[in-house]
Image (cartoon, helix red, strand yellow):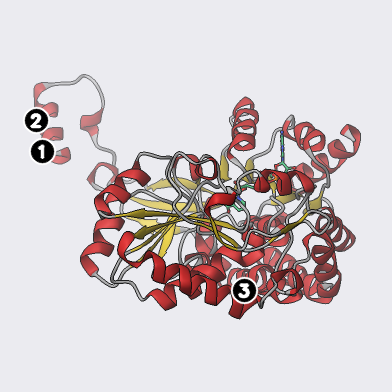
Amino acid sequence: MENNFNIILEKQSAFFASNQSKNTQFRIEQLKKLIRVLKANEQLLNEAVYKDFKKSAFETYETELAIIYSEIKIAIRKLSHWAKMKSVGSGLSNFPGKSYIIPEPYGNVLVIGAWNYPYHLSILPAVSALAAGNTVIIKPSELSLNASQAMAKIINENFDEGILHVIEGGVEETTTLLKHSFDFIFYTGGEVVGKIIMKAASENLTPLALELGGKSPTIIEKDANIKMAAKRIVWGKFLNGGQTCVAPDYLLVDQSIKEKLIDEIRNQIKLIHGENPLFSEAFVRIINPRHFQRLISLLDKEKIVIGGNTCENELYIEPTVLDNVSFDDKVMQEEIFGPILPIITYENLDWAIAQIKSRPKPLALYLFSNTAKVQQKVLQEVSFGGGTINDVIMHLANDKLPFGGVGSSGMGNYHGKYGFTTFSHQKAIIKKTNWFEPWFKYPPYTKGKLELIRKILG
Ligand code: NAD
């Protein structure tokens, strides 16, 4: 294993040193090839992720492939512009001079992906890294094993391993990889492993981005459009079987509208997944028995108001809603990451905001309210990675918005130009001419010179 890794890393290192990836046309060609080979192998990709957790071809396209294709196309269109040296002012102290910012690739990048959107979370960062001129090793999650194998096959058969390569494996392989010195690490996954990655990166002072998770609250105010809120929450919560980093983790609902909201959620689940979601082709399974058991242990039977049925053989948990939940309940002690939706009520929005603020900063926050003052209050008072007003998850689907967490939900961001910037060092340059040099900056430091620089520098 170690020897194989060394060979690939040496190839990537030598390739980067050859300066070929500094050429933007070269990068565009790699991205064109990537979209071509992914499109040609869609069936293989769909079948693999279906085997992993019964994810439908529709959801795979909607939440993974379409976003990757769109990101590649944007990068192809824009990367020459993004990569251009930018002129900025120089100020009096550098007169006569010109100042530039040159976005330069870091070099050899390691992307560590998570299992829940296996293509999206491994390939999307790689697109930005390649667009920025880096070489990339993708280490997908071993939990979505079939998807990992499919990516390895498609990418490794079509790309020079010095440019882009997939290394499969779990903890052992990742630990070995992390002993090597990369120029940038991009990790998606949970907080506990995030700390391990950051510690390993610190050994080589490697810059990194951490895309982590946490409990994303959804506030539903009394003036919200309840029917629309229920529709959008049900879609976003139960998408991918609830295994979405930005899924609404729990609802904070104004007491006066709770019953109506629960009724609408019940109707919506039936509309989307039928009387028995076990037979719904659109309902994804839990990734493995360990996560299934973890989720079952969060189900407080007394509090189930919708769903609650499970089937261990199928790794199936019905879309489930828990009512009368408090922050002390087990389901509120960890990120749920499954199709269980707890409801906590409030009488006063300030109390709800204080509860969120007393906990780790969420990756996402959603607010359903049509009152501008309420919207402004929540946006101003609560810190979180990103969010949507009157919808859920959709901020992730706008490449003009940076996607990432804050505090314990992560650091760094990507998507569109933000991804390019994340994988680039901003090299700062001042270019001087030789016809003038301020004599007063040199010793001996006289009173007169001090007065002069005070006047010039302010
Ligand atoms: P995971 O188990 O797939 O682990 C993520 C990666 O870390 C995998 O590649 C895995 O092989 C590697 N890994 C696991 N243990 C390791 C160790 N001890 N040392 C080194 N590497 C190790 O994913 P997960 O952690 O179960 O993912 C779920 C979490 O990820 C949730 O918290 C979720 O919110 C978060 N997430 C965040 C985003 C985002 O974009 N912010 C996206 C998806 C998931």
- Frontmost residue, 174 versus 422: 174
In screen coordinates, is 181 left or right of 228?
right
Kindly indicate whether the residue at mark 2 contacts the one at mark 3 (C-beta within 8 angstroms). no
Q: Residue at x 27, y 50 (%)?
A: 381
In screen coordinates, is 77 left or right of 60?
left
* Other residues around mark 1 within 10 Å, as few (<14) / some (14–19) / many (≥20): few
Kindly indicate whether the residue at mark 1 contacts the one at mark 2 (C-beta within 8 angstroms). yes
- Frontmost residue, 64 versus 250: 250
Residue at which label 2 appears: 451
Residue at which label 3 appears: 70
Residue type beneath disc 1: Lys
Alpha-carbon distance for marks 3 and 2?
58 Å
Residue 228 visible? The answer is yes
Quarter containing ligand 1?
Answer: top right
Alpha-carbon distance for marks 1 and 3?
53 Å
User: x and y percent of residue 397 in the render?
Assistant: 53, 69
Q: Earlier in the sequence, mark 1 or mark 3?
A: 3
Query: CB of residue at label 1: within 8 Å of ligand 1?
Result: no
Element under disc 1: helix
Instruction: Report the disc number at residue 455.
Output: 1
Image quadrant assignment for residue 62: bottom right
- Frontmost residue, 441 versus 327: 327
Name the quadrant of the C terminus.
top left
Q: Residue at x 57, y 54 (%)?
A: 245
Name the quadrant of the N terminus.
top right
